[in-house]
Structure formats: C-alpha cells, structure tokens
Amino acid sequence: MTIGTFLDEVGSKVPAPGGGAVASVTGALSASLGRMVVAYSVGKKSLAEHQPALERAAVVLGRASEMLLQLAAEDAEAYATVNALMKLPEGDDRRKAEWDGAVEHAVNAPRAVVGACADLLRLLESLAPITNRHLRSDLAIAAILAEAGGKSGWWNVKVNLELVAEEARRVAIRNEMHRLLGEMADRRMRVEEACG
C-alpha cells in the first residue's frame, strides 16, 4: 500500500486501518528516520570510533521498522476479531470460547507498539552523541515520532484494557504503560536537548 492509499484508507469510514495502524506506522517512520541519520554517519572519519555501534544501530532500526509495520497488521486483525465477537450475543458459544484470547490479543498488539517505541527511544538517545551533527533535526524528529507512536499505542491499550476481566492484570498493564510513557517522555526530551 502506498502512503497515499494508506492515508485515504485511514481517512475513510472503515474501522481499519485506524489509530492502531497509525501508531505503528508513526513508530516505523521514527525508526526509518533514525536509520537515515545513521546512514549519514557511517563512514565519516570523525565518527570512525563509533562505526561498530552505528552499524549495529542500522540493523536494529531496520528490524524495528519492519516489526512496527507487522504490529500495525496485528492490531487491525485483533480489532477485527474483537469487533466480530462483540456483534454476537453474550451467551454465544463462540464468543465465550474466543473472548479472552481475542481481548488479550487486542491489548498485546498495541502494548507491543508501546514497548517497541520505548526501545526505539533508548537507541535514539544513545545515537545523539555519536551521529552526524548535520542531521540533528532529523534525530530530534525521530525521537518525537517514537514518543508519539508510543503514546498513540497507549490509547489503544487503554481502550481495550477495559475489556480485560481481571482487575489485577488491568492494573499491572496500566502501571507498566505509565512507566514506559514516563521513560519515553524523558528520553525524547534528552534527545531534543542533545540536538538543540
């Protein structure tokens, strides 16, 4: 799907792609932009001592972008499953049999987006002192997008968390998400300061 087609699909009156896909694609854009910063840093004489770290970062950023795009598809699939089950009567055998697993999937797909974006921000922060200074604005934008992807993913976790029956599990996931969101905000701010 081209970017234009994706934007048309997001803007149309269809349930997916929606917020989950947008969160994932935002994270993937962050990873790709970070990879560009690394590409302009690899091979520079002034950064020679950092070449092994930069080469590793390029691989990790490529994988992160692919994984986040895969999570977009998983989120859409999870939403479709829960949506289909919700249309069935509460006493329906299929709904009862598949409900818990479907809800778990609907929570875990965007939860993985939040985790991936948090990991991405850790890497971007480590790149601030060892990458091409002429791409500071790109690195800062990558950090902003990573946080935006994570925060957006949280909203899909939050809306699906209400469907989880066990309160202790809801609380544990909510606490985990708030911790990651706080870390992401701190890291994004440090990247922006380092790029400023």
Image (cartoon, helix red, strand yellow):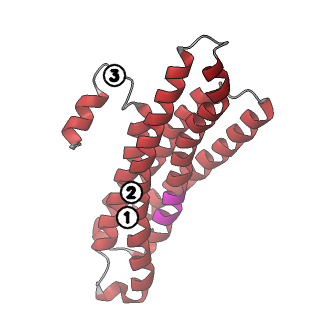
Which amino acid does the dot numbered 3 rest on?
A: Val
| Disc 1 packing (10 Å; few <14; some 14–19; many ≥20) | some
Q: Residue furthest front?
A: 93
- Image position of 170 (left or right of 135): right
Does 37 sit left or right of 100 as displayed?
A: left
Residue 16 highlighted magenta (yes or no): no
Return the x and y of residue 157 as percentages of the image width and height: 58, 35
For marks 1 and 2, give the CA distance.
Answer: 6 Å
Label 1 and label 3: CA atoms lie apart by: 30 Å
Tell me the chief SS of the magenta region.
helix
Question: Looking at the image, which residue is at 40% across and 38% down?
Answer: 21
Numbered tag placed on residue 14 in the rendering: 3
Image mark for residue 66 = 2
**Does 6 appear above or below 54?**
above
What kind of residue is marked 1?
A: Gly
Identify the element where label 3 is drawn.
Answer: loop
Q: Is residue 23 above or below residue 183?
A: above
Q: Is residue 121 magenta?
A: yes
Q: Can you tell which of label 1 and label 3 is closer to the viewer?
A: 3
Stretch of the chain drawn in magenta: 119-124
Quadrant in the picture for residue 25:
top left
Q: Are marks 1 and 3 in contact (CB under 8 Å)?
A: no
Q: On the picture, is 179 further left or further right than 142?
A: right
Which element is circle 1 on?
helix
Q: Residue at the spot x=38%, y=45% of the render?
A: 26
